[in-house]
Image: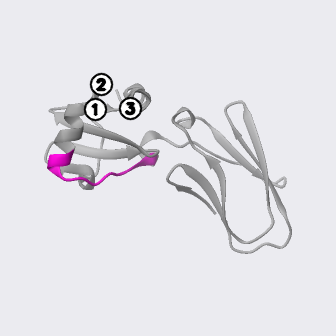
């Protein structure tokens, strides 16, 4: 079974009869690995450039498993209180105005203010009608801006 854990694609092997050879393709890169024991194994670290790119995993000649990891697949909670949110938000310089992301209520610090993590990087934001102002590291802000209309 394949799973996404934070920024890593992992495989969970419950039963193993013989060694498995895996080939992972993303963009123009190819990675190979072997599975020799049961349990969980980290296959690939996902970066911002990997979002929305086709990923293919082939196991010993079986039909390949193809999928994409989207922005919302890597959004995680980033708990903080309102005071800390406002302090950090005011200190961040890099920002973008984007359309509205569909975020679960658990991501909101206050009614119109949210704090999330994307592949480990903090992203803070405020909602204004049908728009959001997001702040964070430049590469994260740009990655979100380019994916949210």
- Cβ–Cβ below 8 Å for labels 2 and 1? yes
- Cβ–Cβ below 8 Å for labels 2 and 3? no
Residue at the spot of label 1: 134
Secondary structure of the residue carrying tag 1 is: strand
Q: Earlier in the sequence, mark 2 or mark 1?
A: 2
Residue at the spot of label 2: 96
The x, y position of residue 140, in whole percent, is: 41, 33
Query: Where does the N terminus fall, quadrant-wise?
Result: bottom right
Task: Give the side of residue 125 with respect to residue 137, left or right.
Answer: left
Callout 1: 10 Å neighbours few (<14), some, many (20+)? many
User: Does residue 76 show up magenta in the picture?
Assistant: yes
User: Does residue 3 show up magenta in the picture?
Assistant: no
Query: Where does the C terminus fall, quadrant-wise?
Result: top left
Q: Which mark is residue 45?
A: none
Task: Give the side of residue 33 with respect to residue 44, left or right.
Answer: right
Give the label, 2 or 3, closer to the camera.
Answer: 3
Residue drawn at the location 60% of the way across and 46% of the way down = 45
Q: Which residues are magenta?
A: 74-84
Q: Earlier in the sequence, mark 2 or mark 3?
A: 2
């Amino acid at each position: 079974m394949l799973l996404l854990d934070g920024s890593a694609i992992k495989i969970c092997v419950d039963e193993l009869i013989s060694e498995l050879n895996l080939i992972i393709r993303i963009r123009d890169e190819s990675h190979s690995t072997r599975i020799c024991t049961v349990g969980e194994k980290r296959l690939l670290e996902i970066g911002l450039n990997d979002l929305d790119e086709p990923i293919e995993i082939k196991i010993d000649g079986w039909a390949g498993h193809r999928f994409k990891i989207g922005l919302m697949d890597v959004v995680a909670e980033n708990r903080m209180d309102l005071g800390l949110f406002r302090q950090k938000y005011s200190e961040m310089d890099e920002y973008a105005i984007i359309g509205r992301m569909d975020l679960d209520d658990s991501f909101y610090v206050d009614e119109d203010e949210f704090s999330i993590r994307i592949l480990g990087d903090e992203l803070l934001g405020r909602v204004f009608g049908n728009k959001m102002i997001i702040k964070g590291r430049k590469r994260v802000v740009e990655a979100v801006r380019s994916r949210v209309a």
